[in-house]
Structure formats: structure tokens, C-alpha cells
Amino acid sequence: MILEIKDLSFQFRKQPIFTAANLAITQPGIYAFVAPNGSGKTTLFNILTGSLRADAGQITLLGQPLNQASVYTHVAYMQDISVLYPYLTAREHLQLIAQLHKVPAERVTAVADALQVTEFLDKKVRKYSLGMRQRLLVAMTFLVDAPLILLDEPLNGLDPVSLKTVRQAIIAAGEQGKTVIVSSHNLDEVDRITKDIIVIQNQQLNLTKSTDAESAEQLYTALFE
Ligand SMILES: Nc1ncnc2c1ncn2[C@@H]1O[C@H](COP(=O)(O)OP(=O)(O)OP(=O)(O)O)[C@@H](O)[C@H]1O
């Protein structure tokens, strides 16, 4: 068992987001996390990484109850671009993560190359386009060699070339035996990376599959329209 969520409840200002929700991820791989705006995707990531505390429920990660120490060693979380420092370069961001998580220098180079961050490594973040910021964030996340990777809308604002770069990095992580949960509203990209889809519906978490005959878009339409 990789991730098990049992009877998770969470309210925000008396608005229920999750009500006794359950989810079991038993196999590594790539899972798309798809649901309408405001339904709780970022909230779940924040609960899984300890930034928000659930009102009720149990979460186990690799068979152990989730706590600060297990999040640190087992989870890499890509948040939004607001976590970047405008006056630091990509190299400095990557070095910060590398020092914190004791990542060898070769891995820093390999990840920077894979996400095509190398070309702007020594430029300050304040000069970056949205796509450059997104690629740096994805690189920072993949630098942490964690078994569970949470990516909150990594495909946002990417041009087709950057989309391909990020998609290939996600697929490679899946092939390396990681579990990657990717929230996205880009259903064409979801179809390119996985058939396993987690949805939020009626404050519940459901793990479902798109099929060869049914695209993520069709699945979404059937569930939410
Ligand atoms: N600080 C907060 N902590 C928890 N919930 C919040 C907070 N601020 C707003 N919310 C509410 O929680 C609900 C879930 O929001 P969340 O950002 O998790 O949704 P989301 O599915 O990630 O949305 P999006 O697709 O727009 O990114 C929303 O109704 C939102 O208004």
C-alpha cells in the first residue's frame, strides 16, 4: 500500500470539502487528479503534506501513519510559483533543495537538464516567464528523491515544447517506480500521461480509470456536467 486515506473529513469556514473520504493507492505509477475549481485538490495536497490539519480521518503513507518526519523523507510537493525567490537564480534554488535533502551534484545536473532549466540556470527568477518558473518548480520537486510526488497543476502556462518536457519528466518518474499525483485541468495532457484518475465528487475521493474508448475529457463530462 502506498497511500491510504480513511474517513477523511475537512471543512473550510464551515464549508465541507471532504466528508468521510477514502482513497487507496496500492500501486506506484502516475495518477491524474482531476476535479472542478475549488473542489479541494490543493487542500488535499496541503493535508497530505501537513500544512492543513484534517478534522477527522487517518492517512498512512507506505504503511506508516503520516507525520512530519515521513512527509520530509517520503513526499516531494510542487506548490505554486509563489514559493520561488525572485532574487535567486535557478541554480541557487536547486542548490538549496540539494543541500536540504543531501542530493548529489550529478543528480542536480541531470534534473536541470531533463527539465531544460540549464539554459537559464544563472538568471534571477524575477526575469523568468511563467513557463520557466513552472519548469524550475518541477525540477526542484523531482530533485527530492521521494517515492510520492505531488504536483499541483505543473502543466499550467506551458507552451507545447515545455509541456512535452514536463510530460516526459513525469512519465520517467512513473517508470522509475515513483507514485506521482498530478492535478490538472488539461485533460488532453492527462490522456497522454495516464489512465488512472482520482476525482473529487460529492466531497469524496474516487479512483477511476479512463479507457481506450473513453478519454479523460469524456469521463470528466460524464461526472461533472
Ligand atoms: N486557506 C484555505 N485553506 C483551505 N481551504 C481554502 C482556503 N482558502 C480557500 N479555501 C476553500 O477551499 C475549497 C477548495 O479549494 P482548493 O484550492 O483546494 O481547490 P482546487 O480543487 O485546488 O481548485 P483549483 O482547481 O481552482 O486549483 C475552495 O472552496 C476554497 O474556497
Image (spheres, grey):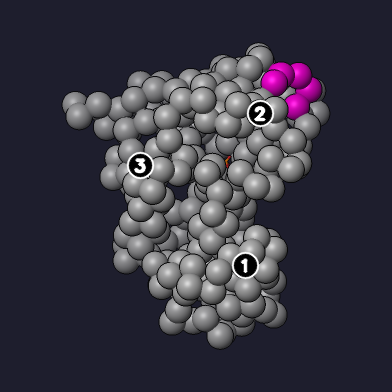
Name the N-terminal-most of marks 1 and 3.
1
Q: Quick one: SS at disc 3?
A: helix
> Which residue is identified by label 3?
190
Q: Is residue 152 visible?
A: no
Q: Which residues are magenta?
A: 54-58
Q: Position of residue 79 (x, y in %)?
A: 62, 52
Disc 1 to disc 3, C-alpha distance: 29 Å
Q: Which mark is residue 98?
A: 1
Tag 1: amino acid: Ala
Q: Amino acid at mark 3?
A: Val
In-image side of 182 versus 193 (left or right): right
Q: Residue at x 59, y 50 (%)?
A: 76
Mark 3 neighbour density, 10 Å: few (under 14) some (14–19) many (20 or more): many
For numbered disc 2, what is the local secondary structure? strand
Our reading of the magenta stretch's main secondary structure is strand
Q: Determine if residue 63 is in view.
A: yes
Kind of residue at badge 2: Gln
Of residue 124 and residue 118, the one placed in the foreground of this image is 118
User: Residue 199 versus residue 24: which sits nearer the camera?
Assistant: 24
